[in-house]
Image (tube, coloured by chain):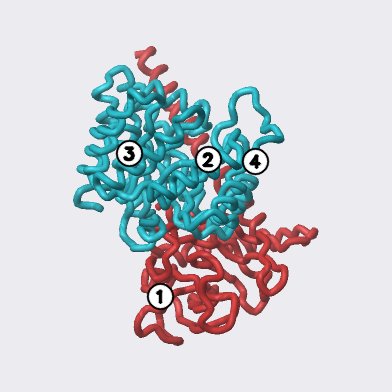
């Protein structure tokens, strides 16, 4: 099912994200974890892109398995940085042949030391989106950044770039993680004012590793509200407590989003069925 | 005793100092807020800075603040920012004389719109810019303008007396065209406050600080 159909039902949409294995020997454990999450029957599941080597094929394999085992629609990530047009064509064919209708079109992280050389066919996600549009009847998602893309000069420039993506044919957006809902509300105001009207799924990261998140935030430029910092300070050294507090914080964020009319929430559950299950359980009467 | 007396005096001096500082801080806040309001309401291009104008603005701000005492404080489901006097293009280049409250779900008809103030419904129906709009004139003559509605509250009519919190209609995306036009922009409420309607566009004031103040209650 195309995700645009899900987004137009007027009902809350809760989805999870998983990642493919890096090596073949890990495929079974990843399959098991993703199947357990699919068994929770989220609205859909996204599978990140295994860039480089043969791992991009794993994205398709995991996405296909999710759809076939539990009938959960899948969204396959596709990144274009350092890919040739032929490689993108190959991946699009694979997706189409395996019944994957939804693509999350991303630029991807530029490899360290690279400066977008001439041979790259796509330099921006907007170019990839426009290209995919010509290659089949896919439903295309794009990324957006409530706190601004780390490479953007300012939010105005960032939103102008986002508008280009949407104008290129992006059907919906998923946000980067954020920990203060007011940041998202402010962002939604600005993109709506800029005339961006496609559905937006709010990206929520249940933090289960306090030390890791501090590092991720330093890189991505995410800000951590004082209330959340206190949780990390208090529980980062106790994994069980951190997981419980992280899931509770994420649940609270989701409830506030739903109460404010943000009906689409994408949980960066990674390959953690227990975290996904706990969140689903916490929202069982709300969704 | 001496030690106790000295200590008591120090304590009372310290309390006195605190009171003075609190008063000074409060005075600074009031002056700063007034300066912001004056800056927001000052007609663009006006190089003459008259004391009478600043005084009038202060009185107007107090009037509006008093009138909206009963306005709902819950703005859940929407987001707003200060866009007063920003550029608008429909119908030619012009300024934005109000505050837009965006529906986070961008769904026409979802969020109720309540009157901010007591008053009489003096405008109701379609206009090209505002779509389905409601205009409420308060007892002091200030005009509160709610535009781009999806639908009206059942039974609402021109001449009705409304109280703060009275349902006026639902947020929508109507306007920018002939009667019935929708979908030209995201679902939002355009809120305008005009202190002296006869004076035209120059008398719209910025609703943003008042909304911020109400929401913080």
Q: Which residue is mark 1?
A: B168
Judge the density around disc 1: few (<14), some (14-19), many (≥20) Cα neighbours within 10 Å.
many
Point out the tag, 2 or 3, that comes first from the N-terminus: 2
Above or below B111: residue A16: above
- Image spot of residue A72 (x, y percent): 29, 49
Residue at left offset 58%, top offset 46%: A128
State how far apart marks 4 and 1 are (Cα).
54 Å
State how far apart marks 2 and 1 are (Cα).
35 Å
Q: Which residue is mark 4?
A: A121
Q: In this view of the protein, which residue sits in the foreground, B31 or B159?
A: B159
Which chain letter matches label 4? A
Tell me the cyan chain: A
User: Nearer the viewer's eye, disc 4 or disc 1?
Assistant: 4
Q: Which residue is mark 2?
A: A147
Tell me the SS state at disc 4. loop
- Residue A185, disc: none
Dot 3 and dot 1 within a common chain = no
The answer to which quarter of the image holds residue B98 is bottom right
Q: Which residue is mark 3?
A: A250
Tell me the SS state at disc 3. helix
User: Nearer the viewer's eye, disc 3 or disc 1?
Assistant: 3
A96 lies left or right of A148: left
Tell me the red chain: B
Q: How many marks?
A: 4
A238 lies left or right of A77: left
Q: Which quadrant is home to the N terminus of chain B?
A: top left
């Amino acid at each position: 099912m195309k995700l645009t159909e899900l987004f137009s039902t007027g009902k809350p949409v809760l989805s999870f994200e998983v990642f493919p294995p890096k090596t073949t020997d890990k495929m079974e454990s990843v399959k098991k974890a993703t199947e357990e999450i699919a068994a929770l029957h989220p609205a859909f599941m996204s599978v990140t892109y295994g860039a480089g080597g043969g791992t991009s094929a794993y994205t398709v394999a995991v996405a296909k398995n999710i759809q076939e085992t539990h009938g959960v629609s899948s969204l396959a990530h596709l990144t274009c940085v350092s890919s040739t047009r032929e490689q993108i064509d190959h991946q699009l064919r694979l997706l189409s042949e395996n019944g994957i209708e939804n693509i999350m079109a991303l630029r991807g992280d530029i490899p360290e030391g690279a400066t977008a050389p001439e041979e790259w066919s796509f330099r921006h996600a907007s170019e990839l989106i426009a290209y995919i549009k010509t290659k089949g009847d896919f439903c295309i998602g794009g990324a957006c950044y409530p706190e601004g893309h780390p490479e953007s000069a300012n939010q105005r420039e960032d939103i102008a770039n986002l508008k280009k993506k949407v104008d290129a044919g992006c059907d919906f957006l998923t946000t980067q993680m954020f920990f203060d809902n007011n940041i998202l509300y402010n962002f939604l105001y600005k993109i709506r004012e800029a005339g961006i009207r496609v559905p937006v799924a709010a990206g929520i990261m249940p933090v289960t590793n306090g030390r890791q998140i501090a590092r991720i935030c330093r890189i991505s430029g995410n800000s951590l509200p004082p209330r959340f910092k206190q949780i990390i300070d208090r529980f980062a050294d106790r994994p069980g407590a951190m997981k419980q507090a992280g899931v509770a914080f994420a649940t609270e964020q989701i409830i506030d989003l739903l109460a404010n009319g943000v009906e689409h929430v994408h949980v960066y559950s990674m390959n953690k069925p227990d975290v996904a299950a706990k969140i689903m359980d916490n929202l069982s009467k709300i969704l | 005793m001496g030690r106790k007396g000295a200590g008591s005096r120090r304590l009372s001096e310290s309390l006195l100092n605190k009171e003075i500082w609190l008063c000074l801080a409060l005075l600074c806040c009031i002056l700063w807020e007034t300066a912001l309001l004056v800056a927001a309401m000052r007609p663009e291009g006006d190089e003459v800075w008259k004391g009478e104008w600043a005084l009038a603005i202060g009185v107007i701000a107090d009037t509006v603040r008093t009138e909206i005492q009963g306005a709902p404080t819950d703005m859940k489901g929407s987001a707003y920012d200060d866009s007063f006097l920003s550029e608008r293009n429909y119908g030619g280049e012009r300024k934005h004389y109000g505050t837009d409250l965006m529906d986070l779900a961008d769904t026409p008809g979802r969020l109720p719109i309540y009157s901010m103030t007591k008053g009489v419904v003096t405008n109701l129906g379609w206009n090209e810019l505002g779509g389905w709009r409601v205009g409420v004139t308060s007892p002091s003559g200030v005009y509160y303008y709610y535009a781009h509605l999806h639908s009206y509250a059942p039974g609402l009519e021109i001449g009705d007396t409304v109280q703060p919190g009275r349902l006026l209609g639902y947020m929508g995306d109507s306007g920018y065209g002939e009667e019935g036009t929708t979908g030209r922009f995201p679902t939002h409420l355009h809120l305008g406050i005009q202190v002296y309607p006869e004076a035209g566009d120059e008398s719209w004031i910025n609703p943003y600080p008042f909304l911020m103040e109400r929401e913080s209650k």
